[in-house]
Every structure is written in structure tokens, then in C-alpha cells.
């Protein structure tokens, strides 16, 4: 998928949602066995004539990340056990998919339904009837988007759409958590694919383009810029592959409790971090190529436009940062305890390595881990809003520290090169624990934050 995604014309997006939907059907026992076998068989088929793609229609006009407060679609029970859906889906990716999963509120016999998260249930529907007609679906318009233009995204009216209940009534949000794990992982794959593709273009161009009498690869400042981009790209790949390893162990039921704790913590982290870095690398890549990078004929501007959505769909950076905090709270601190212990235990042996670069890198990782520990201990004495203000920097600190560990381990395997050691060293020389740095400056104080906000925004306030 890393290789295929940048060339797929965004087909990798419906494949991500298809993978997530298959995971729902594979694990769910609520559906009738016949329906479950049929849908799961289509989603996992290797035959083009029987393979289905799945959409994911969650977002409504008031929705976005707030599905509990924004979902207004209602589900009316029918005598055959199915439901008729009535509502308006404002952002439906892969509108041309064969089926989709969507959220709605079940209406009881008295015409009542529950508000909030507990009122939402997950439904499965096929987009077309057996006769080939749309299943009570009216396409209002296709979205005119910044990027991902090859992927049809539409506003849809569901008017009597026949659907089937997937989750237990009222447990739709908890059910989509399984699907989000998969689709967020796929989003990170798309991000890494975009970063690597851009880097390949930048590196190739540097050996072809001459400026001021020599190839641009011979200009030290340009090489420094490329090396920084390469380090970020390799770090993203290492973090993605670690999550892939953990996800594989979970799916084959070989995961330990530590593996599961790390997976719960790292999935939102890998998605938010790689999504932001993909935009940065794509933008820097265009600049490295210069004017040609800004020309549509090269195909490079499309990489930048398409990368921008990666920090938005499946949860924005702030939403996922708060998800990281929730995963820690929900596990009663076990996910974070596992994280800190793993980083310290796995990096400690390298502190006495004979290679001085390896030794120094291991010490920096241990220091970052200690900084994270100290921050958490001090944050425990702050008010409730403190960690929320620190959430983004906290998630970044987890991403950078753990990636540093992975690059260190990669640099110490038996076939490691000098280049691998240099990448680990470079990575760990950055600020791996920005949450600790910002904490020391008092950034997360509610009083200071409020004062800064009022000062900055004062110029925009309308005067009487």
C-alpha cells in the first residue's frame, strides 16, 4: 500500500474503509449469519466480479468529529427486521461504493429516540437494490474539494434507505472504534506513501537539475534540507511498521498485554503525527524542486493537495490528541506505564554500546522518557484543563520518543549501515519531548493561555 497508494488515484481510500468494514463483520455476532457471510465474503473476495468496496457515511451537517451531537439520521424498524433510514449525510467518501456503514438513531414505537452517544447505532446498507436502482439514496451534489478529487465525495439524502443493524442498539460509537483503528492505520500508510514518493522525486531531481554551474545535489544547504526530510520520512516509516507489527499480532491473537496497550496508544499517535508530517514533506518537496514543482503537469501539486486531508479525516490532530489522553484514562494509566517501561527497557542496553553515536542516542531517548515521566507527575497536580492544553505536544512527544527508540533498534541490528546510525542520531537530536519543554515555560497554564488568547484576539474584536 505504501508503494501503491500514491499511484492509486485515491482507490486506497475505499480500500481502507473496506478493510475497516470487513473487520466489523469479522468480529460482530449481531448480524444474521447469512447476511454476515454474504457481506464479509464480498469485502474479502479476491475476484473482481464479486469484490465490494465499502463507504463510511458518518458525517452530517452538524457532525464532523462530534458524531454524538451531530447525527440526526433516524432509523425506523420494519416488520422484516430491517430499518428504513431517513437523514442527510453531508460528507460521504467513496459515494460509488457497493455498500456502506453509517450511524443513525433508532425510533421506538412511540416515535421517540435517544440523544447523545448512547442513542447511536451502527447500520449496514447496500447502495443499490437487486434491480440496480439506488437504495432510497438521492445524490444532492458532489463535493468540490481541495484535493482527493478522483475520489467521489457527495452530500446524500437517505429517504427510506433499507439498512440492517450491525451493533447492539445504542452501541454504534463503540463499534466504529474497531473500524477507526483500521482506517486510521490506512491513513498513516497513505501519509508515509506520499512522503516516500515525494522524497524519491526530490532525490532524483537533485541529480538532474543544475544551478549556478553544478548539480543541486552538490550544494551543501540543499543536501542538508533533503537529509532532514529523509530523516522525517524514515522515522514515519519505522513508526508505521511498528504499528503494523502490533496490529498483526493482535489480529492473529498473538499479542501480549503490553502489545495491546502499545497498540491502543500508538494508533491515534501514528495517524496524527504522520498526517502532519506528510503535508510538511510534500510542501518542502515542491520547494526543493522549485518552479517545476508548482506545475500541475508534473503531478507533484496533487501530492500536496491530497496530503492535506490526511490530518483531517478519521480525526483531526486535536481530536486524536484527546483520544490519546482518553486511551490512557480508560486503561487507568496502563497504556502509558507500558510505553514508558518499554522505551526504558529496550533503550537501556545500548547506553553501554561501544559505538559512541549509539551510546549518545540511547541516552537521549532515556532522557526524553524521563522528561515525559516528570511531566506526567507534575501535571497530576494541575487543574483538569492542563492536560487538555498539553494534549497535542504530549502526543508529539510520544511519537518522537518511540520513533527514536525504533530508529535506535534499527541502527543496532546486525546488517545496519552507517547511514542507519546517522538517521537515529539525527532524529534523537531534535526536541523529542516538546511537552516537557513547553511545560517548563508555563504554556499550559489556563490563566496564561486565556490571557495570551485575549491579547492576540483583541485586535479582531468589534469596538462599540
Image: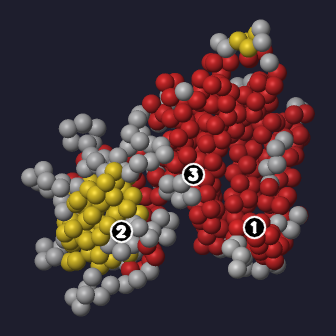
Rate crowding at label 1 as few (under 14), some (14 to 19) or many (20 or more) other CA atoms within 10 Å: few
- Give the structural element (helix, strand or loop) at label 1: helix
Kindly report the distance in space between the C-alpha atoms of the residues bearing marks 3 and 1.
29 Å
- Element assignment for label 3: helix
Residue 263: name its quadrant: bottom right
Compared to residue 393, the image places residue 3 above or below, namely above
Q: Residue furthest left?
A: 131
Query: Which residue has dot 3 on it?
Result: 311
- For disc 3, the neighbor class at 10 Å (few under 14, some 14 to 19, many from 20) is many
Taking the view exactly as shown, the residue that stands out farthest to the bottom is: 110
Instruction: Write down the residue under mark 1.
Output: 459
For the residues marked 3 and 2, what is the alpha-carbon distance in whole angstroms? Answer: 23 Å
Q: Residue at the location (77% across, 36% down)? A: 424
Residue 315 visible, this orientation: yes
Front of the two marks 1 and 2: 1
What is the spatial separation of the Cα atoms under label 1 and label 2, in whole angstroms? 42 Å
Left or right, 196 with reference to 72: right
Where is residue 167? Give x, y as percent.
34, 70
Q: Is residue 450 placed above or below 270 in the rendered structure?
A: below
Q: Nearer the viewer, residue 437 or 358?
A: 437
At 41% from the left and 63% from the top, the residue drawn is 59
Mark 3 in CB contact with mark 2 (< 8 angstroms): no
Q: How is the image coloured?
A: secondary structure
For image coordinates 53% across by 41% down, the residue present is 305
Q: Which residue is mark 2?
A: 103
| Depth check, front residue: 311 or 361 | 311
- Label 2 sits on a secondary structure element that is strand
Q: Earlier in the sequence, mark 3 or mark 1?
A: 3
Q: Viewer-nearest of labels 3 and 2?
A: 3
Q: Quadrant of residue 396?
A: bottom right
Residue 339 in sight from this viewpoint: no
Q: Which of disc 2 and disc 1 is earlier in sequence?
A: 2
Amino acid at each position: 500500500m505504501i508503494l501503491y497508494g500514491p499511484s492509486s488515484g485515491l482507490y486506497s481510500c475505499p480500500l481502507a474503509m473496506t478493510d475497516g468494514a470487513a473487520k466489523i463483520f469479522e468480529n460482530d455476532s449481531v448480524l444474521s449469519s447469512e447476511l454476515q457471510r454474504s457481506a464479509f465474503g464480498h469485502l474479502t473476495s479476491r475476484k473482481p466480479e464479486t469484490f465490494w468496496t465499502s463507504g463510511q457515511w458518518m458525517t452530517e451537517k452538524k457532525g464532523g468529529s462530534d458524531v454524538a451531537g451531530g447525527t440526526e439520521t433516524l432509523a425506523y424498524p420494519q416488520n422484516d427486521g430491517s430499518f428504513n433510514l431517513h437523514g442527510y449525510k453531508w460528507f460521504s467518501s467513496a459515494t460509488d461504493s457497493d455498500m456502506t456503514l453509517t450511524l443513525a438513531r433508532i425510533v421506538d414505537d412511540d416515535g421517540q429516540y435517544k440523544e447523545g452517544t448512547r442513542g447511536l447505532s451502527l447500520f449496514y446498507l447496500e447502495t443499490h437494490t437487486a434491480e440496480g436502482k439506488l437504495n432510497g439514496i438521492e445524490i444532492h451534489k458532489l463535493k468540490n474539494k481541495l484535493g482527493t478529487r478522483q475520489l467521489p465525495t457527495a452530500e446524500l439524502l437517505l429517504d427510506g434507505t433499507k439498512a440492517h443493524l450491525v451493533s447492539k442498539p445504542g452501541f454504534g460509537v463503540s463499534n466504529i472504534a474497531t473500524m477507526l483503528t483500521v482506517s486510521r492505520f490506512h491513513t498513516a500508510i497513505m501519509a508515509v506513501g506520499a512522503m516516500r514518493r515525494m522524497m524519491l522525486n526530490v532525490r532524483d531531481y537533485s541529480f538532474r537539475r543544475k544551478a549556478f554551474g553544478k548539480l543541486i545535489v552538490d550544494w551543501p544547504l540543499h543536501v542538508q534540507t533533503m537529509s532532514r526530510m529523509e530523516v522525517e520520512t524514515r522515522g514515519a516509516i519505522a513508526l508505521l511498521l511498528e504499528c503494523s507489527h502490533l496490529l498483526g499480532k493482535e489480529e492473529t491473537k498473538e499479542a501480549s498485554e503490553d502489545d495491546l496497550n502499545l497498540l491502543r496508544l500508538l494508533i491515534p499517535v501514528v495517524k496524527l503525527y504522520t498526517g502532519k508530517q506528510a503535508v510538511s514533506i510534500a510542501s518542502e518537496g515542491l520547494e526543493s524542486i522549485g518552479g517545476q514543482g508548482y506545475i500541475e503537469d508534473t503531478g507533484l501539486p496533487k501530492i500536496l493537495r491530497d496530503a492535506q486531508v490526511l490530518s483531517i479525516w478519521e480525526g483531526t490532530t486535536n481530536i486524536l490528541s484527546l483520544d490519546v489522553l482518553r486511551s490512557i484514562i480508560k486503561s487507568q494509566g496502563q497504556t502509558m506505564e507500558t510505553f514508558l517501561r518499554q522505551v526504558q527497557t529496550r533503550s537501556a542496553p545500548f547506553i553501554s554500546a561501544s559505538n559512541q553515536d549509539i551510546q549518545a542516542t540511547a541516552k537521549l531517548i532515556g532522557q526524553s522518557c524521563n522528561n515525559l515521566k516528570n511531566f506526567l507527575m507534575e501535571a497530576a497536580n494541575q487543574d483538569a484543563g492542563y492536560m487538555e492544553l498539553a494534549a497535542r505536544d504530549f502526543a508529539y512527544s510520544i511519537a518522537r520518543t518511540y520513533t527514536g527508540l525504533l530508529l535506535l533498534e534499527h541502527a543496532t541490528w546486525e546488517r545496519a549501515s552507517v547511514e542507519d546510525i546517522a538517521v537515529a542520531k539525527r532524529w534523537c537530536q531534535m526536541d523529542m519531548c516538546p511537552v516537557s519543554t513547553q511545560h517548563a515555560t508555563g504554556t499550559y497554564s489556563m490563566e496564561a493561555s486565556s490571557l495570551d488568547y485575549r491579547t492576540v484576539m483583541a485586535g479582531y474584536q468589534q469596538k462599540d
